[in-house]
Image (cartoon, coloured by chain):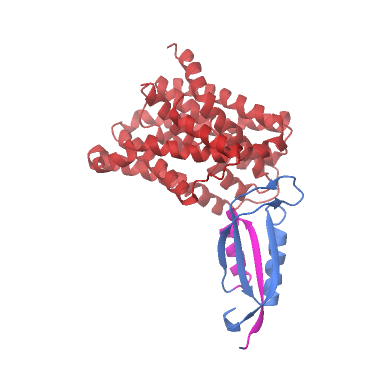
Chain colours: A blue, B red
């Protein structure tokens, strides 16, 4: 089975950001996204307030490398300062590269 | 003590004892949709019985009250509490807005004691939800360079679940009248107290969960969250007296003034004032003020306002 390399970028953040984030992602060139409701905890940036179980979303986008970089940079600049965000990128293999 | 309050305490104790009791999220959402609709419907049906004219000055007075309260809270938070302008504005917005559940508990309290009140008070719940939030945002933005996404914000605030259901309920009740709503009356009016009791169980669980945040934010919020509601209740009562509400109406308006939002305001603040620390404002409104109002505040305001009304 031939798979083609793409990037999977995962953003876990506050659910309040959902509509803004989706708009940004699509504007930056992503063709689609998947969202699920998650919960968790951790330390938010420099602030001492540790997030206990709160409503979060996990946004997954499969895209090419430049788009993934653009999204990561955008989230870093616009959201990571004031909102709890976790972002990571992994390599995935897809069957239909034109879809992403 | 009202059984409704005992349910709240049960939730608090369960959470503090680290029980795994949890209301499923869907159930919590369903119960709150029910409460909002029921309050709106009841208010709307009563509103239809009143001529609009004499209500207008009352509406104006209530809106002004909602806008003024955060202006009073802000300096206390900023200069006494030494919060930065964003946190001060955010907490002020929370206290300028209202808690629908606190209102429901106050209504149950009045019903239990046979104190009559203007049945169209739910209209004021709607009116008081928004001005406080807007003023809080303006306080945060004064002098700051960042621009507010007013579009997204307006959508969030005006079409948020609480406003849509309360206003929708009011309109449906107002248009339909009591006869048309008779088939729904059993569900919406008779079951209200039972649903509120279940909901308060969840509120106890959630409020107790905020106690950890309180230890970090310190004693100031503990003091603020108990003293300011009393002051605001007095102001609300004075306004009620000035616009000609009954004692029951004054207790409700005072309770609304004393209550702090923990759904509408946090959601709006997260978008409009992201620099504000949400755990701070939630610890105050949900961890301190909501339990205070429910356990001690409402009876206290009753006594205070009875004295004001010379009853």
Q: Residue furthest left?
A: B179
Residue B134 placed where, x, y %? 56, 41
Residue appearing at x 59%, y 69% in the figure? A26
The answer to whether residue A93 of the structure is visible from this angle is yes
Asked if B169 appears above or below B120 in the picture, the reply is: below
Q: Is residue B184 above or below residue A80?
A: above
Q: Position of residue B165 (x, y in %)?
A: 41, 45
- Residue under the image location 73 percent in, 39 percent down: B84
In the picture provided, is B294 more to the left or to the right than B79? left
Relative depth, front residue between B72 and B77: B77
Percent x, y for residue B310? 44, 11
The stretch in magenta equals: A2-30
Q: Nearer the viewer, residue B95 or B291?
A: B291
Residue B262: quadrant of the picture: top right
Using the image as rendered, state which of residue B274 and residue B54 is in the foreground.
B274
Is any part of residue B245 visible from this angle?
Answer: no
Q: Residue furthest top?
A: B310
Q: Is residue A7 above or below residue A35?
A: below
Residue A93 counted in the magenta span: no
Q: In the picture provided, is B104 more to the left or to the right than B47?
A: right
């Amino acid at each position: 089975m031939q798979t083609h390399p793409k990037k999977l970028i995962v953003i876990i953040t506050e659910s309040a950001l959902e509509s803004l984030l989706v708009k940004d992602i699509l504007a930056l060139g992503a063709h689609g996204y998947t969202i699920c409701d998650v919960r968790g905890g951790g330390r938010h940036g420099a602030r001492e307030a540790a997030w206990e179980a709160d409503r979060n979303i996990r946004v997954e986008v499969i895209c090419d490398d430049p788009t993934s970089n653009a999204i990561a940079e955008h989230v870093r600049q616009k959201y990571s300062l004031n909102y709890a965000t976790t972002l990571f990128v992994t390599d995935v293999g897809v069957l239909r590269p034109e879809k992403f | 003590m009202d059984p409704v309050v005992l349910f709240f305490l049960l939730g608090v104790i369960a959470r503090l004892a680290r029980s795994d009791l949890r209301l499923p999220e869907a159930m919590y959402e369903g119960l709150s949709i029910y409460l909002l609709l029921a309050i709106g419907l009841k208010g709307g049906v009563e509103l239809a019985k009143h001529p609009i004219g004499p209500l207008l000055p009352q509406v104006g007075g209530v809106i002004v009250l909602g806008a003024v309260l955060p202006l009073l809270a802000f300096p206390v938070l900023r200069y006494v509490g030494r919060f930065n302008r964003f946190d001060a504005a955010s907490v002020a917005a929370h206290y300028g807005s209202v808690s629908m559940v606190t209102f429901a508990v106050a209504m149950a309290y009045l019903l239990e004691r046979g104190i009559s009140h203007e049945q169209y008070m739910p209209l004021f719940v709607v009116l008081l939800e928004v001005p406080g939030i807007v003023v809080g945002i303006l306080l945060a933005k004064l002098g700051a360079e960042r621009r507010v996404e007013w579009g997204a914000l307006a959508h969030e605030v005006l079409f948020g679940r609480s406003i849509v259901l309360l206003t929708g309920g009011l309109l449906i009740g107002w248009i339909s009248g009591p006869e048309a709503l008779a088939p729904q009356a059993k569900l919406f009016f008779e079951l209200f107290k039972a649903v509120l009791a279940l909901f308060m169980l969840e509120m106890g669980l959630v409020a107790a969960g905020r106690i950890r945040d309180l230890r970090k934010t310190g004693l100031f919020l503990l003091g603020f969250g108990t003293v300011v509601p009393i002051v605001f209740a007095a102001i609300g009562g004075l306004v009620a007296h000035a616009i000609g509400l009954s004692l029951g109406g004054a207790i409700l308006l005072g309770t609304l003034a004393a209550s702090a939002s923990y759904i509408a305001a946090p959601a709006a603040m997260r978008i409009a004032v992201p620099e504000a620390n949400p755990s701070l404002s939630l610890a105050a409104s949900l961890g301190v003020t909501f339990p205070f109002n429910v356990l001690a505040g409402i009876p206290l305001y009753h006594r205070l306002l009875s004295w004001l009304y010379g009853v």
